[in-house]
Amino acid sequence: MPEWENVTESFSEKKRHYKNTYMEINEVYDGVVEVSLFSSEEGPYEIYFSYGIFYGIIYVDAEEAYSKREEVKKELAREYEIHKEPTAEFINAFGEKYKVCLPNDIFFNALPLFDL
């Protein structure tokens, strides 16, 4: 059974700073599922995840950031072990439960790819 691998150190200190956040930890599960935690002095912490076609940010208070990250990791790993790809039912339930947001910069960076 795969385990979570901490790959935080593969990012330079400069790359760990993103806008007003700092990457505290980045872990991958079987090279497929990724969960990162970004801290912030000015706003909520961010849990970024990606799993197949499903990715997003979960905003959390600093006090619950680490426990919520562990909860998210367990749910994503469980879905991966069962289906290998996120099902529509999982995406909908997980998205609603955690109030998943799409990262604006990813969306806006993709705009030039479309013929508008």
Image (tube, rainbow, N blue to C red):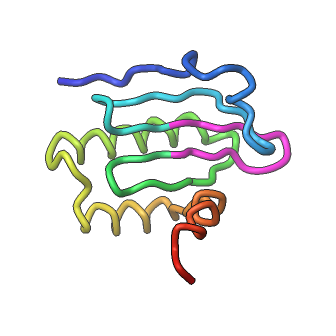
Classify 98 as above or below 43. below
Residue farthest toward the top in the current orientation of the protein:
9
In this picture, is 35 found above or below 58?
A: above
Q: Position of residue 16 (x, y in %)?
A: 68, 29
Q: What is the tally of numbered marks visible in this picture?
A: 0
User: Above or below — where is 116 with respect to 114?
Assistant: below
What residue is at 22 percent from the left and 61 percent from the top?
Answer: 87
Query: Is 13 contained in the magenta span?
Result: no
Q: Residue furthest right?
A: 42
Q: Quadrant of the N terminus?
A: top left
The quarter of the picture where the C terminus appears is bottom right
Q: Is most of the magenta stretch helix, strand or loop?
A: strand
Residue 76: percent from left, percent from top: 33, 45
Query: On the image, which quarter does residue 81 sit in?
Result: top left
Q: Residue at x 53, y 79 (%)?
A: 115
Which residue is drawn at the image coordinates 35% and 39% (left, top)? 33
Rendered residue at 74%/33% (across/down): 17
Q: Is residue 35 left or right of residue 78?
A: right
Which residue is situated farthest in the left direction here?
A: 82
Which residue sits furthest bottom?
116
Q: Position of residue 66 (x, y in %)?
A: 57, 34
- The x and y percentages for residue 101 are 56, 63
Q: Is residue 56 above or below residue 76?
A: below
Relative to 40, 94 lies left or right: left
In the image, is 40 to the left or to the right of 80?
A: right
Q: Quadrant of residue 97?
A: bottom left
Q: Magenta segment, which residues?
A: 36-48
